[in-house]
Image (spheres, rainbow, N blue to C red):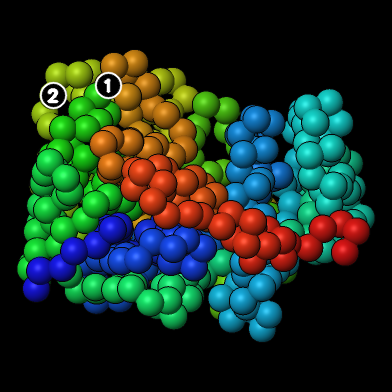
Amino acid sequence: MSEEYDLVIVGGGISGASLLYTAAKFTDIERIALVEKEEEIAAINSHHTNNSQTLHFGDIETNYTLEKAEDVKEGAELLAGYLENVDPDREMHSKRSKMVLGVGDEEVRSLEKRYHDDGFGDLYPKLRPIGRDEIEDLEPKVVEGRDPNTDMLALQTPDGYVVDYGMTSQSFVDEAREEDGVDVLTGTKVTDITEQTDDFRIETDAGLLYADTTVVAAGSHSLQIAQEMGYGEHLSLLPVAGSFFLADDFLNGKVYTLQMKKLPFAAVHGDADVHDGSITRFGPTAKVVPTLERGRISTVSDFFDVFGLRPAAALSYANILADRILLPYVLRNLVYDVPEVGKRAFLPEVQKVVPTAELEDIDRAKGYGGVRPQIVDTERKSLDMGEAKLTGDDVIFNITPSPGASTCLKNAMRDTHQVIDFLDEEYAFDEEAFREETIGQFPRLED
């Protein structure tokens, strides 16, 4: 096999699939290929058992600043609109209530300030503060067993989209395949990418591909490939594995707790599974692991490729993990994986959401959880929350921890503009049509 393309996308998770959809459906780029090493699309972190199934709008994520929330909000509305448009029967997603819960005077004051003073009530018209009685109407188990004299407040919205990102990725690919000039190569591993004078030579285990421009959207492996090509050498990764505990039918929707300050990881929350409302998932936990894919020992060496045994990386890790808030959190999360002991240790986290939960009510979910690559800047020796993008000459590398799935279409829109620019504007992107098929279908308050 030896093929030539205008654009090659490496990685068939939600990020790569959303770019394929956007470029194939809304540009006139003639030849596009997506290359995925697994036999199935979205088999790793985008699979529905390997992530929190949350569509992050920034409304109940209390570690988001207003500026970050504004950016995430548009991305979430793009994807929510797409789902409303193509999935009216809710096969790929469900829509439920969601809330962030404040218990006690301090947490209640924090939510009141966030809603009224910090601008979140204005940014999210559907978001509203509700008290104990309304919380109980929506989520009886959240109120049951609490001291009636303890203040409670929640910021609640009906936009609780719960998403099977694997099925959504497949939907993007299916839509793209309807267009001429689109090839989807699954079960095909990229072994090397070489930047040549006029194009990229992409070696795979099935043959050679040539591309005028390339986008690498391979999760944790994106930085590994970038560094092999000489990009992002000041970055490293702190891979964090998330796990979940399961219970029976505790919650109707999604209930978040307040985010711990200085932590880039999601606050513990409970929610009903996207495909089975009788299952409540609690988590995620956040365990630091020296691997780029959950449960795959072969990717330990890939991690050390990125880590590089560099003094700057080691010093950055030491600086980050020495933090008096982060270190106890990391150590506590290691305990959650210990049989029996872990369940006992995690029960208080569950009881923050459902006070009457008991030890026999929860079990560690086997086969659930993925790896989220947190970005480490070895120059500033800091942990950077969110996504990273490296842009070179006619090449883009996307490293997308949370909320990368939520903002996949916004990232795809940006990357499509960049790809058109790489191709010397030989082609055009119909952004108006793209928006009409996505965010144009998102239901507004007046609807």
Residue 378: image tag: 1
Q: Given contact means CB atoms under 8 Å apart, are the residues at marks 2 and 1 in contact? A: yes
Residue 310: image tag: 2
Q: Position of residue 230 (x, y in %)?
A: 16, 32
At label 1, counting other C-alpha atoms closer than 10 Å, the crowd grade (few under 14, some 14-19, many 20 or more) is: many
Q: Quadrant of the N terminus?
A: bottom left
Residue reaching furthest front?
A: 426
Whether residue 243 appears in this view of the structure is no
Position of 82 relative to 210 (above/below): below
Question: Foreground: 195 or 123?
Answer: 195
Position of 179 relative to 68 (above/below): below
Tag 1: amino acid? Thr
Question: Foreground: 404 or 340?
Answer: 404
Q: Residue at x 24, y 62 (%)?
A: 5
Residue 300: image tag: none
Q: Secondary structure at mark 2?
A: loop
Q: Residue at x 14, y 62 (%)?
A: 209
Q: Residue at x 44, y 80 (%)?
A: 178
Residue reaching furthest bottom?
A: 89
Q: Residue at x 72, y 65 (%)?
A: 441
Tag 2: amino acid? Arg
Q: Position of residue 280 (x, y in %)?
A: 59, 68
Position of 13 relative to 176 (above/below): above
Q: Secondary structure at mark 1?
A: loop
The Cα–Cα distance between marks 2 and 1, rounded to whole angstroms, is 9 Å
Whether residue 380 appears in this view of the structure is yes
Q: Position of residue 377 (x, y in %)?
A: 32, 24
At label 2, counting other C-alpha atoms closer than 10 Å, the crowd grade (few under 14, some 14-19, many 20 or more) is: few
